[in-house]
Image: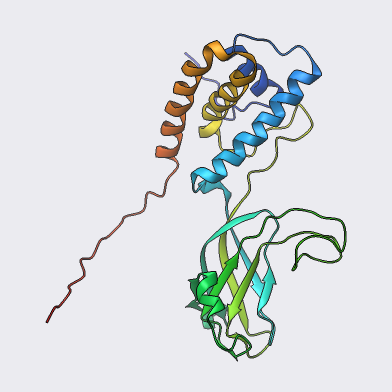
Amino acid sequence: MTTSGTAGFNLDLNNIVEEALERCGKELRSGYDLRTARRSLNLLTVEWANRGVNLWTIEQGSIALNENQAIYDLPVDTIDLLEHVTRTGTGQNQQDLAITRISVSTYATIPNKNATGRPIQVWVDRQSGATYPAGGGPQGTDPTNGIDYPKIYVWPAPDQSNYYTFVYWRLRRIQDAGNGGMTTQDIPFRFLNCLIAGLSYYLAQKIAPDRLQMLKMQYDEQWKFATEEDRDKSAVRFVPRRYFTE
């Protein structure tokens, strides 16, 4: 028996919607069917962002820090930062130094926010990423394009330019479903069945309420399978801490 010799199976948007509708006992027959399914698919990926860490959306980035500048924009599709360091030097002389994440309450109580030195603390101001008319939006919105960028506030502010680099590992948003039916989705193949199960559950709320409970159970099962596989498999070491009392 001869195998295919390939391992590139994937589904485009049309096929994903068709499969999800068929699980609801329906067929893809109109442009509206595709449009409402695409909207549900985008809402489904927003739900996934709220459920936790999706490993395939972790990206590394960096920001060159400038003298006396404490506030910097992050990419607009940033959900949150997982890790971050302050980097100095390059090549064999490169050093990554720990920078501690603090809350807005801690940042607010810093007496002198204009102090300069090596940044040792950072507050991540996540913001909304919303777009407003130029010059509008909340305070801190970019005045030229009206985008409410997520930001970092480092403390102390850098005492020199072209020396410190803020290096981070971020969670980005899952890309939108797109407008074309031939586009593939921004997920690994191992989440494909989970995506279809979730979409069929979302669609059932609108067009197949009689199948809602069954499809919800299937979605929960597929989510469990996918997320238990999509995890960090590195070794974990727990070290007990000794406490002394008088």
Picture quadrant of residue 23: top right
Q: Total of numbered circles in the picture?
A: 0
**The residue positioned farthest toward the left in the image shown:** 246
Closest to the observer: 174 or 232? Answer: 174
Q: Residue at x 61, y 38 (%)?
A: 45
Image quadrant holding the C terminus, namely bottom left
| Residue 241 sits in quarter | bottom left
Question: Horizontal placement of 4 versus 161: left or right?
Answer: left
Residue 86 visible, this orientation: no
Q: Quadrant of residue 160?
A: bottom right
Could you say which is closer to the camera, residue 74 or residue 146? 146
Name above or below for residue 89 compared with residue 223. Answer: below
State the image coordinates of residue 1 (x, y, percent, origin top left): 47, 13
Depicted 47 relative to depicted 212: above or below: below
The location of residue 4, given as percent across then percent down, is 55, 21
| Residue drawn at point x = 54 percent, y = 24 percent | 197
Image location of residue 12, percent across then percent down: 68, 27
Q: As drawn, is 75 to the left or to the right of 188?
A: right
- The front one of 48 and 237 is 48
Residue 133 shows up from this direction: yes
Front position in the image: 76 or 234: 76
- Image colouring: rainbow
> Residue 143, image x and y in percent?
84, 66
The residue at the point 78 percent across, 20 percent down is 32
